[in-house]
Amino acid sequence: MVIDCEDPWDALQATLQARFDDISRLIGDQMDGVIEYLGAYLLLSSAVAGFGLILKFTDTELAQAPEAAAALGRVLEARANLLLSDVEDHWGTFEAGLALVHLISILISNST
């Protein structure tokens, strides 16, 4: 007896793809948020310093070394890209394994 599993299988694949998309978006959003915060912090720090004002939170190493903070932002962006690339690679491996399981299930259901 052959059991048609295409609809549940397609639903599973769609759910897993949606989860992968959510994870990728979350990683991107979090890293973008950190980089944007860093950029806004540097902008505010330099504006405050330009007016001769001192704010409590600008007395940090980042405020004293804006070029280091800018480099940190570039490094964070590169790391975010590497992390997303790794997630995509792992997803590809997982998806290939899932396709193999699907093929095996079809072969087993057709042989019975």
Image: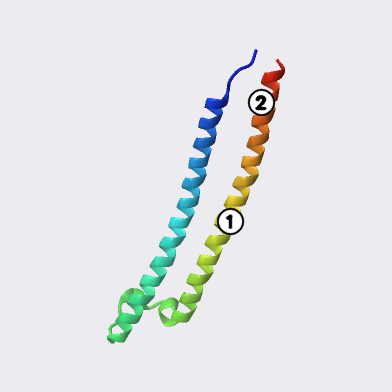
Give the residue at mark 2.
105
- Classify mark 1: helix, strand or loop: helix
Residue 93, located in which quarter of the rendered image? top right
Residue in the image at 53% along x and 26% along y: 8
**Residue 54 image position (x, y, % from top left):** 30, 81
* Up-down relation of residue 102 to residue 23 (above or below): above
The residue furthest top is 1
Residue in the image at 68% along x and 19% along y: 110
* Up-down relation of residue 56 to residue 23 (above or below): below
Crowding at dot 1, Cα within 10 Å, few <14 / some 14-19 / many 20+, comes out as few
Nearest the eye: 98 or 34: 98
Report whether 54 appears left or right of 66: left
Report whether 104 appears left or right of 13: right
Q: Earlier in the sequence, mark 1 or mark 2?
A: 1
**Residue 43 image position (x, y, % from top left):** 35, 76
Residue 39, located in which quarter of the rendered image? bottom left
Q: Quadrant of the C terminus?
A: top right
